[in-house]
Amino acid sequence: MIATQSEPLWTRAFGLLCVVQFLGYAQHFVLQPTIPIYVTHLGASPFVVGLVMASFAATSMILRPLVGYWSDRWSEAGVMISGLVIQAASVLLCFVPVIGITMLANSCRGVGWASVNSGGYALLARCAPAVRRGEASGYYSGAQGSATIILPALALWLIDAPFGGYDVVFAVSMTIALIGAGIALMLKESNSSGPRTRHRTAADPWWREIFTLPEKDILLASGLLFALHISLPAVAGFLVLYARQIGIENFAWYYVVSGATSLIARPLLGWASDKIGRGAAIAVGFSLEGLALCVIVNASTLAGMLVSGVLYMAGSAIGTAATLALALEHANPERRGQVIATYSMAYPLSAGVGSLVTGGAIQLAGYFWMFLLVAALNIPGLIVTLKNWSRLK
């Protein structure tokens, strides 16, 4: 039967999936500012702090194909639940005030993070109507990103509160993850998230399936996602330092405005990507991100920075929703979990590469030229989009 625009999007399964993803990301964003401060509190140098944070990204990226394979062989919802439980259990190690154990905890947390994302994306492919995948991707990523608006600030407040401290933050993060796992059990009980039967010949070993490259369209979607996010560390990590250097006060408003823009824009612009086509949406995303980074180097006030934040988050919203919808459209149903897991590897990979490029550019040339460099990094992605326009219609 041909899918129509009237197919319902907000089904019970899709609603539960968005709630679970919000809680999974809430658990992550509670710990995102906490762990660096905690490790510093234990006496670590900035270099060691970087190693602790890198241990999370490394396991999250490396294990995604394996986790995706397991979600195909077993259950997407089961993998997501396991990831939330692993996230909660790993935080138990943080109660031991030893830097090495904290690094181990963060590595284990990366395993849980890979599972939460891989299982969630595979379930999204099942829940979203075919002709509304851009809109569904927008709501889905909006549910994930909405946790960034208040949860990091909550963690910092709890650390300094008279009744708070690091242990309180760790307990809160564990509770959030376990609540998410409990809600995800309702998804596992539904027919839409049951295990699938895979067809594999006896001559093909299981490990070969894990390392088999996905379809070209998935690699294209993953590459475009990488190009869209490689500039994110410049905005998320270094912009606040640049603002302090040029004397902009009350810069916390930048995160409030940009976070609210992301929350509002992702569903609306995801819907727009269904209307105008994936290629046009991705091209708009690259263009808005590049424009936003050019605005930064010409901004000397908070208002200019806010304009830049709105432009960047709007570009990121429409581009990310379009690449995710593209991946969902071309994922082989028998390998959906593994394929989408491979697609999502672009997130931690772009964060790592982008951080190295951004930090190196600042060291060599300063903030002004760094922002121009990362703005220029949108051009290759835009060229790839235009060259593959027929595949992105």
Image (cartoon, grey):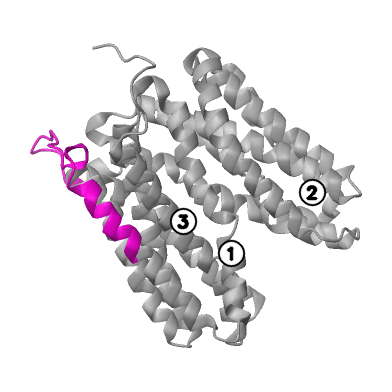
Q: Nearer the viewer, residue 50 or 250?
A: 250
Residue beneath the point at 60% across and 86% down: 162
Residue beneath the point at 79% across and 48% down: 370
The answer for how far apart the CA atoms under marks 2 and 1 are is 26 Å
Secondary structure type for disc 1? helix
Identify the image quadrant of the N terminus: top left
Residues in magenta?
Answer: 178-206
Within 10 angstroms of label 1, few (less than 14), some, or many (20 or more) residues? many
Q: Residue 20, image x and y in percent?
A: 36, 52
Secondary structure type for disc 2? helix
Residue where numbered disc 2 is placed:
370
Residue type at numbered disc 1? Pro
Is 187 included in the stretch rendered in magenta? yes
Residue beneath the point at 50% across and 14% down: 393
Q: Residue 117, image x and y in percent?
A: 39, 49
Q: Nearer the viewer, mark 3 or mark 2?
A: 3
